[in-house]
Structure formats: structure tokens, C-alpha cells
Image: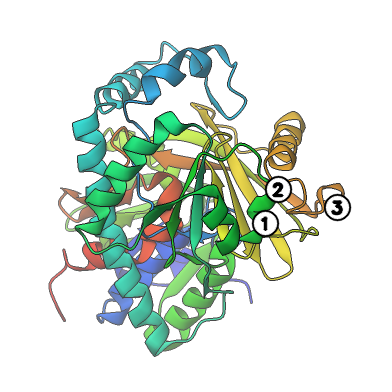
Amino acid sequence: MSPAPASARGHADVAIIGAGVVGVATAYALARRGYHVHLLDRAAGPALGASFANGAQLSYAYTDAMAGPALWKQLPGLLTGRDPSFRARTSLDPDYLRWGLSFLRNATTARLHRNTLSTLELALESRAAMDALLDRHPIAFGQRTAGKLHVYYSADALPAARTMIALKRERGMRQRLVDPAEAISIEPALAGASGMAGVVYSPDEEVGDPWAFSNGLLEVSRNHHGVDCSFGFDLKQLRRDGTSWRLEDAEGRITTARDVIVCAGIDSGRLLRPLGIRVPVMAVKGYSFTAPCGAAAPSASITDTARKLVFCRLGDRIRVAGLAEVNDWDPSPEPSRVQDLVALARASLPEAADYERVTSHWAGLRPVTPFSTPIIGQVAPGLVLNIGHGMLGWTLAMGSAERVAALFPPR
């Protein structure tokens, strides 16, 4: 059934801009507390952007910030394009330069640890919120506890990995460093990975399809909590009108709400600039492909830290996600980069997937802050942000939604 025009839906308590997994989770959190929520997105349905075909891993333990001391060794390859996994498009744009300088300022050991633990706290809140949701509404999205193995190919990286394990253990996370032989006993598919130096094993990590989850949660929110939705709503103007907000799309449709929550991912900066609000969120383009399981498909999730790949099993399919292209704002997948991703995956785990039968490929823009933690909070009267989740939007969505809901008075 096509959604009714926004102008036909009346005045809402809260309008939420963006129906990715973060926006859908936020709509649920507010509506469950008795707020009349109107969810808007320019796409034809929920979770069709960065949430659609991401790595599918609920990485509650692996919240390591993107910027750290290792970045300095990677920087020449990043800037010159020599690293096939991690690239940057240089620019003299002031926003890009400000973001880049802030990102480099966060590439210290102290800030890496601080930012990682800050995100870990939110991840733990998110896991608790997800468990509570599924106790109330058993949404089917292929969720399972798969465990995760982070594979390191250089012994030089292991001391830093041990430090991270120790930091996270203090917060109750179960992680341990295992040798290659034990890693293979945990996940036999790793027998196809040559040159392993050590592996971090996180047994409690989960997987699930974020697109299926978003659709399921939205159905719950509409049927049980009265959430209104307007898809195909390409927002062109957002302005304060007295004590309310006025939202108008490209076709002249108008809706109003007392409060607005921006969950628009990488589009948030463009929407907020006319209000004089600038946010440090950068597009980091990533890719994925999905293929039938191969002869040695892993059951656990696997991260190849050298090639910056994740392998995630979803039923009889394998999803492989990777590549990071900083300052690429075009969500269209480039065929050559899809080929690069397939080649990297084949080199990493040759029999994990049937690489000759890739069924789908995808690219999406991850909204990354320089400090790798999302921006959650009120920035103007009646205007709240829930943006900048980077590679962990799927993991952090439920916890972020709860933090936003806590900003609103109880009903």
C-alpha cells in the first residue's frame, strides 16, 4: 500500500528524517513511549541506503575507532591510492580539510582507547535494547550468535590487539587472543587463510540482515504504536515555524511536527547547513557482495584485518563487505571496485564463497565522524541529531534510539 501524502497526515509530535536502521529504531523508541511519530524518507521504503546490504554483523565487542596510531603508516598509501582497501579523495573543500585534520588528531593511542570505549558503552546499551525488543516482538531477520574472529597477519599488530582485549574485558566483554591452530579449530574455514599471526576471538558476536530487521521493526512500529510513514518524501526545506517545524518536499508536500530528529546519515550535513548547523560527518564509501556459500564457507564471522574485509554467513549465502573510500559521495557501485572486492575476498578465503556466482553487489556511504562515535543530542530548540554511526550503524541503532528517547519527557 502506497503511503498517503505527508500533508494528509496532520501534525506529529515528532518527525524523523531518515528511515535507515537508525531512523526506524528511533521511531520505535519514541512511539513505544507514546509519541505520535512521523517517519520520512526520500527512498521508496526503509533501509535502502547504507543499511541495505552492509556487513550484517552486530559487532558489540569490536567497536575500535577508525583513527589510531596505525593510521600514520597507512597514510601514504591512503592518499596515493596504493592501498586497494582504503583510499581517500583529496580536496580543498574546507569541510573536508576540517574533518581530515580532526581525524588525524584522533589518531593517537589515548584517543583511540577513549573513542573505542565510548562506542563500546553505546554498543552494550544497544545489545540490551535489542534483547528487550526481541523479547516483546520476535522479529525474523536471521539473527544468530555466530562469534567473530579477527585475523591478524602481522605479529607487530598483536600487542595492540592484546591491549584492546584488556580494555574491553574491564567492561565485561569476552574476547581472547588465540593462535592460528586454535582459530582453525574454532572455525575450520580459516584453514584456507595463509600467514595468520594471531586471531582475536569474540564468541558472543551476532549477525543478522539489517534490511529484514528494519522492515520487521517498522511493521511492529506501525501496527503496535501508530507510526506514520511517508516514503518518496525528498526533503527540500526544513525550517522553524513558531513552536513547530515545517518540512516541505520537492513536490511541495508539507508536514509539521513539534520536534524533529535527523537520522539522515550522510545527507544530514546538506539538510542542516541552511539552518547554520555544520556537522563533522564524512562519506566513507563501502562495498559488499553476496554469493552462495562455497565449499569451505565459515559459520563464524571473519574479519581479515590486512585486507579490511568481513565475511558473514546469512543462511545459505555469504556476504562479504569491505573497502573504504573517504570523501566519495557517489553511492553508485563502480564495477572495477566490485571486482577488487571479489579479488580480495578470493585471496583471503578462496573457498568461502562461490565467487563465480555473485548474486548481488552494493555500495553505500557510511557517515563517519572524526572520532568514530555518533553525534546524539539536541542542537537547537526541538531539533535532535542521531547521526554519524560510521561502520556501526547496524550495531548501534537500538542503543542510539534509546539515548534519543531519553532526551524527551516521559508520557
Query: Picture quarter containing residue 157?
Result: top left
Mark 1 residue element: helix
Residue 214 showing in the rendered view:
yes
Q: Which residue is mark 2?
A: 192
Q: Which residue is mark 3?
A: 357
The residue sitting at the left extreme is: 409
Q: Which residue is mark 1?
A: 189
Would you say the residues marked 1 and 2 are in contact, meaning their CB atoms lie under 8 Å apart? yes
**Quadrant of the rendering where the C terminus is positioned:** bottom left
In the foreground, 227 or 307: 307
Q: Nearer the viewer, mark 2 or mark 3?
A: 2
Residue drawn at x 72%, y 63% is 317
- Tell me the CA gap for discs 1 and 2: 6 Å
Residue 170 sits above or below residue 402 on the image = above
Residue drawn at x 62%, y 25% is 84
Residue 47 percent across, percent down from the top left: 54, 60
In the foreground, 5 or 275: 275
Kind of residue at disc 1: Ala
Residue 153 percent across, percent down from the top left: 53, 35
How packed mark 2 is, by other alpha carbons closer than 10 Å (few <14, some 14-19, many 20 or more), is some
Give the mark nearest the N terminus, 3 or 1. 1
Tag count in the figure? 3
